Amino acid sequence: MTSLKKKLLPFEILVLAPNCWSGQWVNRQQLFSRLGCQHPVLYSTGGWFTWHRNLPCWENSSPLGEFLQHDNVWVDDSPRFLLHVPRFPLLDALVSRLQVRRWKRFLGAHGKGPLIVYIYHPMFLRYIKWLDADYIVYHAYDLYDHTPGWDDALENAEHELLRVSDLVIASSDQIANVLLKKVTRNIRILPNGANVAAFDNTIANLEAQPADLVDIPYPRLGWVGSLHAEVDYSLIFELASRRPTWNFVLIGQVTTHANARADAERTKCDSLPNVHFLGSKRIDEIPHYLSHMDVNLMIYRLSDHSWIKAIYPLKLHEYLAAGHPVVSANVPSVRPFSKVVRIADGIDDWQLAIAEALEGSGPGTRDERKAVAAENSWDHRSNMLNEWLTNLAVNGRRAP
């Protein structure tokens, strides 16, 4: 009876994250679209800042603000009149208070029970003192202090979040290890997963391939994800030059952080006839593309100073769910999956690994890859997170 009561206990969740809900689907959308079936969830990227006024999203936003429902979650479109101006601290604090009042009034009308504030980045610390949350959760999904724009203010904010949060979550062991150098406390690991059901449905009902794939010959080597500066474009260029019959298919949006080296290398890749940039795709289209590849790649540029070394790739279990062979850079979080993923290091080894995969002699079978993905689905991840949050709400104490 006790466990049943825990499952049914309602609580409200305010999620503060830097990514728009309608953008690329990552762990935020995957987790809370599921938790939103059980609890009222309000998702917000916070208020507007002065530097947002030249962006298209500013022009398309609601002047007075509104809350819209998407994928079982209420999404906040912040009003433009609540504009953060950090150089005027008193005004900035007033804007934060008014923003918090909007959120709490909305959640109060749509749910009951404890308020859990779920924070995905230290930039949202500014709202904490006004929220009067019952519980605070900090989820570090990246090695933030290795990302562009990190400064002393954000470093201090992260230290404060680590101190006051009732539950701290990291997306990989490597991220947790970095956080443990800043604080002594328990940190739970919630890795990324895959929407396994979407891949199973796609494979079971495989239709004609997407139109922009039709004219790309096999064999196809796929990448799905953000095209950021840590993609190893120089390696792609070298492999594509050595093996002109291999077709590299890169799906994703080029990130906005300027990087002259990456831009130049990406331009060189684009000049090759067997490297194909197809742009970003909707989340429901991704299984269809991956199912029409021969091999899927996690082709990162690794260094001691890169945030990549701490990631748990979002694409890992999506690739495995598609069933095709996977070849990856030597990312620490991928190493435990070496029975179903071929890890490569250096141009010659990459060439050999892809050739082995195309010949069917790489690690794992289709069924073994899909079985690993099934063990690491987003449904499993969201159930685990729901249990952690429920324990917080039921036990009324900081997570051990």
Image: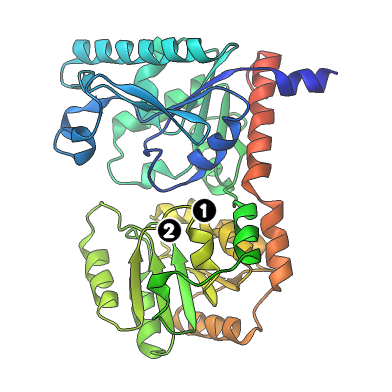
Residue 78, above or below 181: above
Q: Secondary structure at mark 1?
A: loop
| Position of residue 332 in the picture relative to residue 79 (left or right) | right
Give coordinates of residue 348: x percent, y percent: 48, 85
- The residue nearer to you, when weighing 252 against 286, is 286
Which numbered marker is on residue 314? Answer: 1
**Front in this rendered view, residue 198 or 25:** 198
Kindly identify the residue that appears in the image at 21 percent across and 28 percent down.
Answer: 49
Residue hosting label 2: 225
Q: Earlier in the sequence, mark 1 or mark 2?
A: 2
Q: Position of residue 303 (x, y in %)?
A: 41, 61
Which residue lies at the image location 38% right of the left edge and 39% below the top edge? 19
Quadrant where the N terminus is found in the figure: top right
List x then y, in percent, for residue 271.
24, 79
Residues marked 1 and 2 touching at CB (< 8 Å): yes
Give the distance between the C-alpha atoms of the residues marked 1 and 2, in whole angstroms.
Answer: 8 Å
